[in-house]
Image: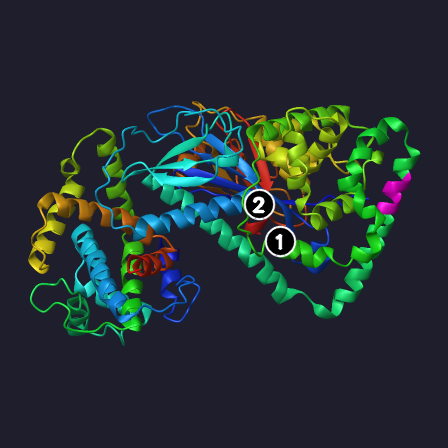
Amino acid sequence: MSVLSPTISKLYTPPTCTLEVTAKTSPLSRWTRTPAIKSLQFLLSFDSSAQRAREPIEIYGDQTQLSALTETVTQYIQTILASRATELPLSGSQSGPKTEPSAPAPDDGTAELALRPRSLLTHELMLGSLATAQSGSSLLLKVSQLYDLATALEDCTTDLQQIPTLIAAERPAAVMPFLRSAAVVLLTVGLGTATWRLFQTGPVAVNPSASTSKTAMAPSATPLPSAPSPLPSALSRPLNLPSIQLPNRSDNSITARRSGNQNLNQAEPSSSARPQPAGQSRATTNAPPQSIASLPSIEAPSVPNAAGSQADASAPSSIGSTMRSRALSQALESAPAPQRSATGQSTLFDITPQVSEVRDYVASRWQPSSPPPKTLEYRVTVNADGSLGAIEPLGASAQQYLNQLPLPQSSSVFVSASGTRSNIRLLLRQDGTVQTFLDEAGQ
Amino acid sequence: MDSSVDAIASLSLTDHRQWGNAVAQPTGDQLDNIKTQIDLVLMALEALTGIGSDAMLQAAVDLGVQEMVGDRVALWRLRQSNPIRRGTGGRKKLDIEEARSLVLISCHLAQKHHETIRRAVCLLEELAEQNRPPHQAALLGDYLDQFTNLYQERMEDDHRTPAALTDIGLKLLIDLLFYSAPQGIRRLWMALLDRTQ
């Protein structure tokens, strides 16, 4: 029963930063033909300036944090535009486009996401809960970087707001009773099977799941009454980017979550002990606070229930870890081909075989004459017969490296036939990592 | 930026999404202040890109607001409504629709000249990092000279020093960058309202 939630990903690439937003589409979207998204995660990387060959500074978070960041940036820009202040110096005392990790990541839980002017041309972004060891507690942004950041965030917000609009416009009301019934049946069967298998497995598998029950297994107790609700709730989540005060999630929690993912993958019990994906997606859909609510137990310095933290870490693992390119790449490379492992994060982006095949093809041949200055991004069109349709470089750097891109001649078959034409986003990172995503927006 | 220009061209004076949540309408006094700000934004665009009334009138046609800004005389009268204009300043009352038309035109032109605006801002950033004066870059030097000339030629408050006018010009240049985005209309309109509160 392969009902993995496909993942959609979209990149926003203004000149000085890259915003990558990834979300899972609900399996029920297949019947509604509308993109219901959930579990949104974002990765924002600020490109290093030309003078400093540092790695891009990256911050990441969930939908609530993305919303808070957008609101902070938007409001701040409005404030400086409305300001009559012209007496600010042109350059601040600490000019410089990029941040030093100015201070350790906040650990007292008091730092808030905020912006403040350092000069007419420099602004300091206090990262609050988004701070990482790499980023430090704040970033110094040039005004052009602030502009790019705002552009990316507002474009993303616009896209997210359009999704529910589409859904509302296209949802066939007459079919809904049938869909709801189908969803109820699927959920009942899925959760029932998961529960049955769970109790059949030994205590080794049950232990981690036992503490998961408050999250992943909770829906199994009441699948029927709440079953019709996934559609509306899943659809409504991206509608209103909430202006919620961010939970004070320290960097430790993110680190814990990421390391927890790895441990979990290694020590994971048999896949049969995990709930069925449908059940899990219900859990994440109908329990929005899950990822947030579970965080305090992760970030607590002394976790009384280690199994609890491990189990909680499993919840965001599917998307959260995939935002980390290297972890993603390693997971994808080490994982076998998609199989029955319903929670195999390595397959999240491999919605079609062509996605992994393009990645494998390029990864085995990618040998640039010099490392690219930044992540190269291309849109690769693969024809229905598996031949190369077109390559579209996205950005100036990608254009420069186009000739070195190890793809075959146009119309040459290099991946398996899929029967449909597909657009695949190809990312070549500075460290040699190759990533591919199904570019649904381009289809 | 073509797509953005097309997008802005499709907007209308009554499309509330682009004007933000500014439900409150400006009062008469607020409109007086708005007149000054819009006139200065347009003047900064003139100084940086060399555009004149022809480009503004063409923008009005592109945006479908030629009823508000139909010819040179109408445009001149609207801009002369700026209370600090020399001679005839403040003669005309500016109504909301006219103010919005000028906002549309300003942002349309800012989007059209986005690359020039961004280049100027990036130059300014580079020079500031090197602690060099902005006049050392030709684009910025020409802009600041032209802005100062236009200001002294057109505005009544001639007590401002050249350094103060340079500060105003640089602030307007940075503001223009944000107005040149697809969200520029909302940003400019909200900024105009905020400034008057």
Same subunit, labels 1 and 2: the answer reads yes
Q: Are marks 1 and 2 in contact (CB under 8 Å)?
A: yes
Seen from the viewer's position, the closer of residues A430 and B183 is B183
Q: Quadrant of residue A296?
A: top right
Q: Return the residue at label 2.
A: A63
Q: Return the residue at label 1.
A: A237
- Residue type, label 2: Gln
Circle 2 marks a residue in which chain? A
- Please provide percent x and percent y for residue A334: 69, 25
Q: Please, what secondary structure does the residue beneath circle 1 have?
A: loop
Please tell me which residue is depicted at 77% across the width and 61% down the height of the picture: A179
A149 to B66, vertically: above or below: above
Looking at the image, residue A290 sits to the left or right of residue A47; the answer is right
B130 to B32, vertically: above or below: above
Please tell me which residue is depicted at 21% across the width and 63% down the height of the picture: B55
- Determine the residue located farthest toward the right in the rendered image: A200
Q: Please, what secondary structure does the residue beneath circle 2 have?
A: helix
- Please provide percent x and percent y for residue B164: 14, 46
Please tell me which residue is depicted at 71% across the width and 34% down the height of the picture: A312
Q: Quadrant of residue A339?
A: top right
Circle 1 marks a residue in which chain? A
